[in-house]
Amino acid sequence: MLPTSGTAIFNNDTLATQAFTIATAQTLGGSLNIQVGGSGTAATGAVTLSGTLSGSGGSLVKSGTGQLILRGANTFGGGVTIQNGMLESQATQTTLGSGTVTMGGAGSDGATYITGQAITVDGGLHEAFLR
């Protein structure tokens, strides 16, 4: 089970790790940082969250060098920050909940977002996305 806030660290070691899925629903009570990979030196398997993440004030931060996949019909309202690594949204139009989606930021080494969903941009794109 995921914590309601704080940091959850997955696949951060010196051995190759397998991909796995967490299917449990969770109500976020604040900012939840999901770190996939990091200082480990081996291949990092993707972590998939397929349960619904809810919570009107809850937000999600993706950190670490690995891949996080969201598949749930999420309803959390505090937005998503993709600081490092890759975030992939699959299955539904609400995998990112509601709120602002931020990529990069202080301490970012590069952030990637992958989706098969239609994207609506409200307010424009930073020029770095246009290059």
Image (cartoon, helix red, strand yellow):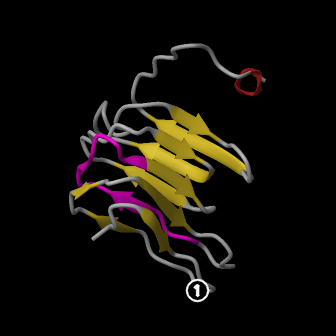
The one nearer the camera, 19 or 110, is 110
Q: Secondary structure at mark 1?
A: loop
Instruction: From the viewer's perspective, tell me whether residue 33 is left or right of residue 1.
Output: right
Residue at screen point 27% across, 46% down? 55
Q: Is residue 61 above or below residue 122?
A: below
Q: What residue is disc 1 on?
A: 15
Q: Where 2 falls versus 130 (above or below)?
A: below
In reply to whether residue 51 is colored magenta, the answer given is: yes
In the rendered structure, which segment of residues is drawn in magenta? 44-59
- Can you name the residue that lies furthest to the bottom here? 15
Q: Is residue 99 magenta?
A: no
Image coords of residue 9 (percent x, y): 50, 72
On-image quarter of the C terminus = top right
What's the residue at 48%, 73% (across, down)?
10
- Residue type, label 1: Leu
Identified at 63% across, 86% down, the residue is 14
* Residue furthest top in the image: 123
